Image (tube, helix red, strand yellow):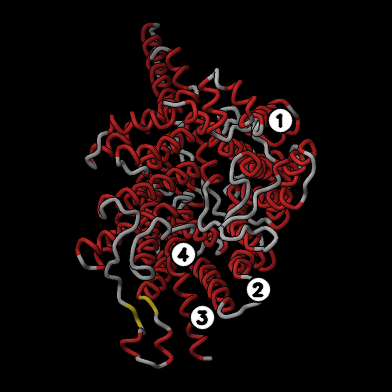
Amino acid sequence: MNSTVAKILKKPITSAILAIVIGFAVAAIILLLAGYDPGGSFAALFAGALSKPKYISNVIIKATPLLLCGISVAFAFRVGLFNIGAEGQYIVGTIAATIVGILVDLPAPLEIPLVICVGTLAGAGLGALIGWLKAKFGIHEVITSIMFNWIALYLCNYVVSLDIFHQPNSTGSYPIHESGFTMILPNWKTSDEGMAALSNIPWLREVMVKTDVNIGIIVAIAAAIFINWLLKRTKRGYEMRAVGLNADASRFSGINVQKNLVLCMLISGALSGLAGVLNITGISPHGIATIAAFENYGFNGLSVAFIAGCSPLGCIPASLLFAGLIYGGQTLQQVMGTPSEIINIMIGTIVFCMALGNVIPMLINRSEHKRATKMLAQESVRGGDTHVS
Amino acid sequence: MLANLLLCLSITLMYSTPLLFGALGGVLSERSGVTNIGIEGMMNIGAMAGVAGSFITGNPWMGFLWAGIAGGLVAVLHAIASVRFAGDQTISGVAINLIAPGLALFWCRRLFDGAAMSKPITTLPKVFDTTQFGDSALASLDIDITVILGLIATLVLWFVLYRTKLGLHIRAVGEHPEAAETFGINVFHIRYSCVIASGVLAGLGGASVTLAIISQYTQTAISGQGFIALAAVIFGKWTPQGAYGACLLFGFTQALAIMLGGGNSIVPSQILAMLPYIMTIIVLVFFVGRSVAPKADGVPYVESK
């Protein structure tokens, strides 16, 4: 095998692209077997996600919390922790943001940072608690995370049920004060002046008026860049990655493993909490509602992180892909009658292929190894050396 | 009073049984060294396969069998990824949790004209129900047959793991696969069998929800039980008897939350609903402590030359 080809095949991005192709192929086979039209279904899927400016805008809005939860999971995974609790940290983020956003009414330049800080801190607090329970009592983060996910869910329902927050005749809370909204120019775009300015640019008008365009994605991308920098360019990040690769070796070389575990979960929780806050401040209904089952932002964050190979920057395209598939999948069912669960099967297949991520490098190494041994053997025969091992 | 106690016992057993099957699957898989986050997905496909089996054949026991097979088949995927190809077991498990519920709901829609829930189906028989005991107190016990099967499965798994050569091999593979290999134990065979068997058990766990408790498949029939089962594995320190205890405790706190919530309780229902989860954490902190997984748990085994 050509060594350049081998090098390209060994790159993580190649595995990801291959995984996506296989995901579509498997979905196509299942659709065929079940008697649906795969070509038409995929066309509807892409049309549903990309054919109008407002669809693309909605995909980006949907991708925002997935990106933040994805970075949250990816970051923890790099430090050797499995943060299955991103879901709960997301929920407490939404709860805290809603409580503060309803109780406190300040001018926007103060209100927005306050709401974002409190919500992020709530997620960070829950994350740190999980990390502390592991560091102090040795309780596996998976078990505490799973328990706290449920506690967060019921806490949300409890807060919604309280008279000061509960909006009568609904299953939700009141919205937060408008000064806490993080949409881009929400009042201007519906004013006469705004309408006039936007009428010249139809796509922008459609995007601005018909979707909740907000600052979330900018914050999320900034977070991805920050976490990437933290992991790769700082001493703290180096320590954390060392803990993730080998906790015992790190301890012997003088790294405080316990402290790094707690700090890692604190940051991871903060990211998931931030995802929750931005969904409250950025999109309607700007409040929390009674939840019967998990909304899966955190759990989908797991998939995003793994599709991205746990790279914070890789989470950006991965979250867009994920959001596009989920959003386009809704159209799939409406237009083609294809069960939208096929999207979950597709995403699952992609993630599954990512679990096999080291198969291609493994196979290439093996074939290179074989080739090298063969060449050595041939050379030694030519050289007259009879001692071939 | 007696009726209340029996009711509490009945709810405890009802909640704990599906968890128990899932947890036993987790114990078996992890003892052989393969983490199984995919229990939730395997339970989900089992829940649907059980309904499909009972609906198509009219025999709930066939459904129970189908559930085991379906869970086992999904587990084959996990085994291929994590045993054969030394893939990341956590990632593979997360993938299973997307694929299996997707397949289950897809199957449900194909079988029941596009509906996201199945028609009601014939369920498995009960032990101690009203038809046998009429109005006596025992009738409120109302135990499903799966409760008994769960207990038997626990005893069998305990016996296999600790009293047979096979069990010794499984535990050896989970602690130190390289050493096991030098003794002539085939690490791949053991891990393959254990992962597939764990899928079978998880599938039965899913079916013990749909074939015994709610008598139909819905999208939320399995919503998190697989994860609680996973927690029970760790809580029970990777032993069948420990997992049984953990599941019972969990079921009991659920029962407590339900019994306390009846009538005009002063504690809001949402706070009561948190009880099982808070209790689990408290018990872990104060009574169970540090959990140590089998040494090679989650570590892919790559054959050395």
Which amino acid does the dot numbered 4 rest on?
A: Leu
Most foreground residue, A204 or A382: A204
- Give yes or no for contact between labels 1 and 3 (Cβ–Cβ under 8 Å): no
The residue carrying mark 1 is A230
The residue carrying mark 4 is B19
Q: Nearer the viewer, mark 1 or mark 3?
A: 3
The residue carrying mark 3 is B8
Q: Nearer the viewer, mark 2 or mark 1?
A: 2
Residue name at image x 24 percent, y 63 percent:
B55
Residue at mark 4 to residue at mark 3: CA–CA distance: 17 Å
Which amino acid does the dot numbered 2 rest on?
A: Val
Marks 1 and 3 belong to one chain: no
B121 vs A382, left or right, is left
Q: Up-down: is B139 above or below A146? A: below
- Near mark 3 (Cα within 10 A), the count class, few <14, some 14-19 or many ≥20, is many
B111 vs A66, left or right, is left
Marks 2 and 4 belong to one chain: yes
Task: Tell me the SS state at disc 2.
Answer: loop
Task: Tell me the SS state at disc 4.
Answer: helix
Which amino acid does the dot numbered 3 rest on?
A: Cys
- Circle nearer the N terminus (3, 2): 3
Q: Up-down: is B141 above or below B270? A: below
Chain of the residue displaying label 2: B
Residue at mark 1 to residue at mark 4: CA–CA distance: 40 Å
Residue at mark 3 to residue at mark 2: CA–CA distance: 19 Å
Which amino acid does the dot numbered 1 rest on?
A: Leu
Residue name at image x 42 percent, y 40 percent:
A348
- Give yes or no for contact between labels 4 and 3 (Cβ–Cβ under 8 Å): no
Most foreground residue, A94 or B185: A94
Marks 1 and 4 belong to one chain: no
The residue carrying mark 2 is B267
Residue at mark 1 to residue at mark 3: CA–CA distance: 52 Å
